[in-house]
Image (spheres, rainbow, N blue to C red):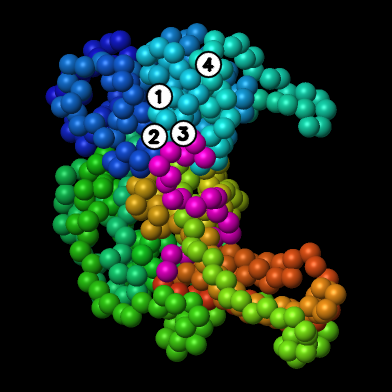
Amino acid sequence: MTTFELNGAEVDVQGWHPHLLSALREELGVTSPKDGCSPTGQCGCCTVLVDGKAIVSCQVAMEKVSGRSVTTLEGFEEAERERLAAHMQAFGALQCGFCTPGVLVRVKGLLDKGPLTRDKAARHLGANLCRCTGYVKILDAVEALAGDAVCPVPEAGDAVGSRGARYEGTALALGDRDFVDDLRVPGMLHAALRLTDHARAEVVGIDVSAARTAPGVVTVLTADDVPGALKVGLIDKDWPVLVPTGGRTSYAGDVLAVVVAETREQARAAAPLVDVGYDPLRPIVDPVAAVEDPEPAVWGTDSNVLSVSRYARGGDALQAWEASPHQVHEVFRTQRIEHAFLEPEATLAVPRPDGTLHVYSGGQGVWDDRDQVAAVLGVPAEGVTVELVTNGGAFGGKEDLSNQAQTALAAFLLGRPVKCTLSREESIRLHAKRHPIRMEYRAACDEDGQLTSLWARMVGDSGAYASVGAKVLERAAGHASGPYRVPVVDVEAIAARTNNRCAARSAGSAPTRPSSPWKA
């Protein structure tokens, strides 16, 4: 047991927790500190005050807070809470809001220490990442707070282009607006996913006996427990919810089993106990080579070419290129981009008394989620209701199902609410990324600089499963010549299947963490 002061009152933490953040969220029900990357301490979303000092709580062991004072946004004086939230809204300093509570706690710690300048705030707030708002507006709000400026929340005007406040901005800024992982319902169980150990391998056996007898475990589900469709997908139904014995894994995010337990820690501890037998195969990772590879990279397919988008007009583009006085021949490569949204994927599925299932999803398409979940459960679409919960960032990376189907399956079969939240590492392994594309261009112009010819060949790495890969490469082909008038054009864009991470529609900026993003 660990005893400390939380928001002015003494509390006793009875259970075992890997860090302070877990104790706050899972046992004490304090959810304004958000879990974006525990236990790495990289994002700053879980910042709290310990004896007045701003600290990321997922890096604090429980014994370190014994007898000390911990303060979260729930413990701030109401007038101060209102002032902090009003400034964030007045300056447009929050969008998804997942990072904002951690930012405000650190700002509070800085303000309590004395005079605060913009430069000083920038140096210290580098410990808090923001993926969608941008740092300038946040620093504008902090600078106004330091100067005791009164910043009323703007009211939405009637005119087009008039300024307005972020919807639910106060609740988001203060951490009072629940994201999926903040939701709690009576009798709720927790699920964890057993991911594959090999990107491409035949699955020769799945033994769940050790996991099933682990402490707190209620059940372990495999593909044998799926009553409906085994595969889902936004366009092509090629993505297995669970890879069965006798099936084949096709990328590092494939799921083999779902462990359901009384607590999140118990579920996560038991998931690695699922023993999987493999016959590892050669991974196919080069998209250009994959196009001609005789072996299919993905289970259930017969070709590594997902789609071909091609158009031509005006004659022979290569002949026109060779005949032109000025020629350019270049090869460009874009990188695979991790969306790096700050909120890891989470789902809560709750059975209803009428036999239907209510799914709280952080996805970007509730109707697609509903139809796919219903297909997996083998029930009519009307038997599933999907409610979109505020997203903590997405950028196109939450269009596909992540853990919605597995969570819904567990709740459906057990008749009890089940929640599953991915870790940061699981999120990176599982969700689709922005396509890397190899683009070879031959362009030419005449002596007057007028374009005469464009020839382009593109190969995009769609990863294992289709997602919207065909549409992405179709768009790449359509945009190949940009807004320019080119009389002779020949463009081909191929979406290739590989055993790399799956590819999605779009992404935010690159996830590389600068030393101090607040100075950018």
What distance separates the C-alpha of mark 2 from that of mark 1?
9 Å
What secondary structure is the stretch in magenta mostly built from? loop
The amino acid type of the residue labelled 2 equals Ala
Q: Which of 223 and 431 is in front in this view?
A: 431
Question: Which numbered disc flags the more N-terminal residue, 4 or 2?
Answer: 2
Residue 435 in the image, given as x and y percentages of width and height: 53, 65
Q: Which residue is tagged 2? A: 127
Q: Is residue 204 left or right of residue 130?
A: left
Looking at the image, which residue is at 58% across and 30% down? 137
Q: Which residue is tagged 3? A: 99
Q: Which residue is tagged 4? A: 145
Residue 283 in the image, given as x and y percentages of width and height: 36, 77
Density class for disc 4 (Cα within 10 Å; few <14, some 14-19, many ≥20) is: many
Q: Which of marks 3 and 2 is in front?
A: 2
Q: Which residue is tagged 1? A: 106
The amino acid type of the residue labelled 1 equals Arg
Residue 31 in the image, given as x and y percentages of width and height: 39, 28
Specify the segment rendered in magenta: 500-520
What distance separates the C-alpha of mark 3 from that of mark 1?
11 Å
Looking at the image, which residue is at 31% across and 20% down? 53
Q: Is the residue under label 2 in contact with that under label 3 (CB below 8 Å)?
A: no
What distance separates the C-alpha of mark 4 from that of mark 1?
13 Å
- Name the element at disc 2: helix
Is 503 colored magenta in this rendering?
yes
- Name the element at disc 1: helix
Question: Which numbered disc flags the more N-terminal residue, 4 or 1?
Answer: 1
